Amino acid sequence: MKILGLCTSQRGKVSNTYFLMKRAFDALDDQNVEKEIIVASELKLRPCDHHYSLSAKMCVHPCLITQIDPADEMKKIYDGILAADVVIFSTPIYWGNHSHLMQLIIERLNSLENSNSVHRKVLVKNKIGGLMVLGHEDGYQHVVGGLMNFLTEMGLIFPPQAYAAWVGESDENTEKDRQRLESDKLIEEMFADLVQNCVTFAKKILTCPSCDGRFDYEHLSKKKNYVTD
Amino acid sequence: MKPADQEANSLKCVCPKCTLFTDCNRGKEERLFCARRKSACPMDNQKICICGTCLVFRENGLVGGYFCINEISG
């Protein structure tokens, strides 16, 4: 089993977002689980060109940018997601929304999601999703709701309470946040529990005794925007 | 599969209207890359492809784009 973390803070490995994700991943003590964290800010990620707006058939996997721009490193994220059983995204909150890197990745991931509409082929399936969200004073439930909207459409399966979140005080003193995150045991346990819960859920749901060891399904959406041949 | 390389498709082709299309392409009388081959000119992969707006693309059930850079095999 493989668990992938995608940290989407622009501040990368010095961010609180990465700190919480790394600590929670380190806490997962399971030799049968391969762990990887991709730090999005360390990759060269070209923004989506929105070719979907011209034709849905221009937005399928592999993404056109991935095909024609050798400098673009989004392929690491595509390959990471497709190879993982559990995918956990982490994002800071800025003015009530997820990070710009998270938004860039969502827009680029449209090519994975859209393969269902164009080729009737679900590329992201049998994968459990989780979210880590933190900010200083903004609302995390709004951010979680927005992210789940896309990520479930893409094909991730979210277990109950599939996110861990923390926001600080309603003030401008962000300097104390890191110390709080490092010392508060409840915060540490919340984020570690999320990782453990996602892995436990993955083991339960992806192993179906009545279907030869592998839970499988087809996406049965009757959306009217399926692209006809 | 590649569309047919024929006059009717050439007339429908939007390549000359594309932001990637340059004087180099014009000089070499290139167009209809999806039916022929990729361009022999240096192409700017930072510009936005318009293949999906083309009748040749739609009528032939093509998927993808940037056929001036990314030649269709077969």
Image: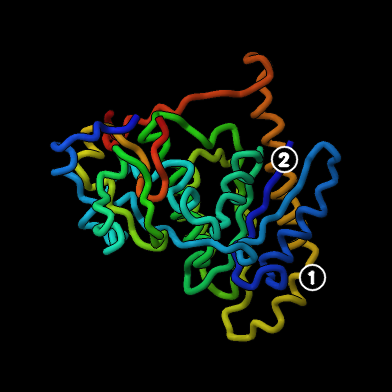
Identify whether A41 is placed above or below B11.
below
Residue found at x 62% / y 77%:
A169
Q: Nearer the viewer, residue A61 or A154?
A: A61
* In the depicted structure, whether residue A198 falls above or below residue B2: below
Q: Quadrant of the N terminus of chain B?
A: top left
Q: Give the percent coordinates (x, y) of residue A167.
A: 61, 69
- Asked if marks 1 and 2 touch (Cβ < 8 Å), the reply is no
Instruction: Give the amino acid at mark 2.
Output: Lys
Q: Quadrant of residue B19?
A: bottom left
**Residue most extreme to the front:** B28
- The residue drawn where x is 65% and y is 65% is A42
Q: Nearer the viewer, mark 1 or mark 2?
A: 2
Residue A21: x %, y % from top left: 71, 59
Give the image location of residue A170, x and y in percent. Answer: 57, 79
From the image, tell me which residue sits under label 1.
Answer: A182
**Toward the viewer: B8 or A159?**
B8
Q: Which residue is mark 2?
A: A2
Density class for disc 2 (Cα within 10 Å; few <14, some 14-19, many ≥20) is some
| Count of numbered tags | 2
Residue B69 placement (x, y as % from top left): 40, 50
- Tell me the subunit letter for badge 1: A
Helix, strand or loop at label 2? It is strand
Mark 2 chain: A
Residue A206 left/right relative to A69:
right
Label 1 CA crowd tier, 10 Å (few <14, some 14–19, many 20+):
some
Residue sitting at x 54%, y 69%? A93
The answer to whether residue B21 shows anywhere in this view is yes
Pointer 1 or 2: first along the chain: 2
Q: Nearer the viewer, residue A33 or B50?
A: B50
